[in-house]
Amino acid sequence: MLYPSIDKLLNIVDSKYILVHISSERSKQMLENHHFQLKENEYYNKKELGRALEEIEKGLITIKRNS
């Protein structure tokens, strides 16, 4: 089972496409800079993509919309 669930994430982000874009960009940042917003042992996932999704769920990443 995936954590966090897609249903919880879609309550935060309106579009699956935006969710994919944001999480992929954040995971690339984690790989390149080794900068994490939580301590290593506070993440449930071991890979950067899962950790990026956790950060979105916990509200550590904010989404700005151009209107």
Image: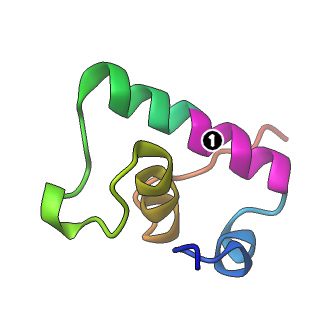
At numbered mark 1, what does the secondary structure look like: helix, strand or loop? helix
In which quadrant of the rendered view does residue 15 lie? Answer: bottom right
Q: Which amino acid type is marked by label 1?
A: Ile
In the picture as drawn, the residue positioned furthest to the top comes out as 32
Residue at 48% from the left image edge and 37% from the top image edge: 26
Residue drawn at point x = 39 percent, y = 48 percent: 47
Q: How far from the left and from the top, in percent, is residue 3? A: 52, 74
Q: Quadrant of residue 48?
A: top left
Q: Is residue 15 above or below residue 6?
A: above
Prevailing SS of the magenta stretch: helix
Residue furthest front as drawn? 1
Q: Which residues are magenta?
A: 16-24
Residue that mark 1 sits on = 22
In the displayed structure, does residue 17 sit left or right of residue 58?
right
In the drawing, does residue 54 fall left or right of residue 38? right
Task: Residue 35 in the image: state x and y as whole percent.
Answer: 24, 35
20 magenta-colored: yes
Mark 1 crowd level (few <14, some 14–19, many ≥20, 10 Å Cα): some
Q: Quadrant of the C terminus?
A: top right
For the point 71% across and 45% down, the residue is 20
Q: Position of residue 45 (x, y in %)?
A: 37, 62
